[in-house]
Amino acid sequence: NLFESTITGSHSLKADIICSGNLQSEADMTQQLSEEQAKKLMEAAIAAASNAHAPYSKYKVGAALLLSNGTDIVPGCNVENCAYPNTNCAEKTAVCSAVARGHRSFTALAVSTPCRPGEFPRLCGSCRQLMCEFCGEDFPIYLVRSDDGQFVKRLLGECLPEAFRPECLLPGMMTGSGESVSSAAPTR
């Protein structure tokens, strides 16, 4: 079930929107973002990849995080390190940069990298978990192939179902803001 659309601009972005296997209408596709916001966000992710430090893998990734004001975009790129576990993903760079600037509320994320035909960028588990710290299950993520501009829209809840979230902490445990969490943790 695919809905195809083309967003025009300096990059021609063709959308193959797949969301929980259900056909989406164009209105659903832009429910949280206008077509112009989505286009700018995806273009910013494509541009951010040019700043990637990827001397080992040559796998340049760009990310762009739209702040809750609907206009400001924080870019991110992957930053590799010769000690591979110390590499920072593009989406983590964008989120950490936004947090360092005092932002904690986000509207959407775009991630871009070249991919094989039929494939799209993927977020690693660590980045998915980081997004769950700040964003709900319906947070939109645009996965953009930088080589041809095609993208899919996913929701964070689809990318990481049953995520561990701050409300999962036991009563009396402290959240990052120092507030006590009152909800019980899910049973395991």
Image (tube, rainbow, N blue to C red):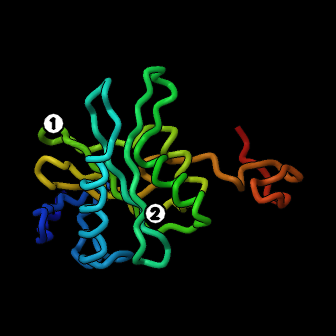
Q: Secondary structure at mark 1?
A: loop
Graded by Cα atoms within 10 Å as few (under 14), some (14 to 19) or many (20 or more), the crowding at tag 1 reads few
Residue 141 drawn above or below residue 121: below
Residue 30 in the image: state x and y as whole percent.
30, 75
Number of numbered tags placed on the structure image: 2
Q: Residue furthest top?
A: 83
Q: Amino acid at mark 2?
A: Phe
Q: Amino acid at mark 1?
A: Arg
- Of the 4 image quadrants, the one containing the N terminus is bottom left
Q: Earlier in the sequence, mark 1 or mark 2?
A: 1
Q: Which residue is mark 1?
A: 116
Q: Residue furthest right?
A: 172
Graded by Cα atoms within 10 Å as few (under 14), some (14 to 19) or many (20 or more), the crowding at tag 2 reads some
Contact, mark 1 vs mark 2 (Cβ under 8 Å)? no
Residue 56 drawn above or below residue 133: above
Alpha carbon distance from label 1 to label 2: 26 Å
In the picture, measured across the screen, residue 59 lies left or right of residue 161, that is left
Residue 79 drawn above or below residue 57: below
In the picture, measured across the screen, residue 186 lies left or right of residue 124, that is right
Q: Which residue is mark 2?
A: 139
Look at 19% across and 39% down and name the residue there. Answer: 115
Residue 2 in the image: state x and y as whole percent.
17, 59
Residue 58 drawn above or below residue 68: above
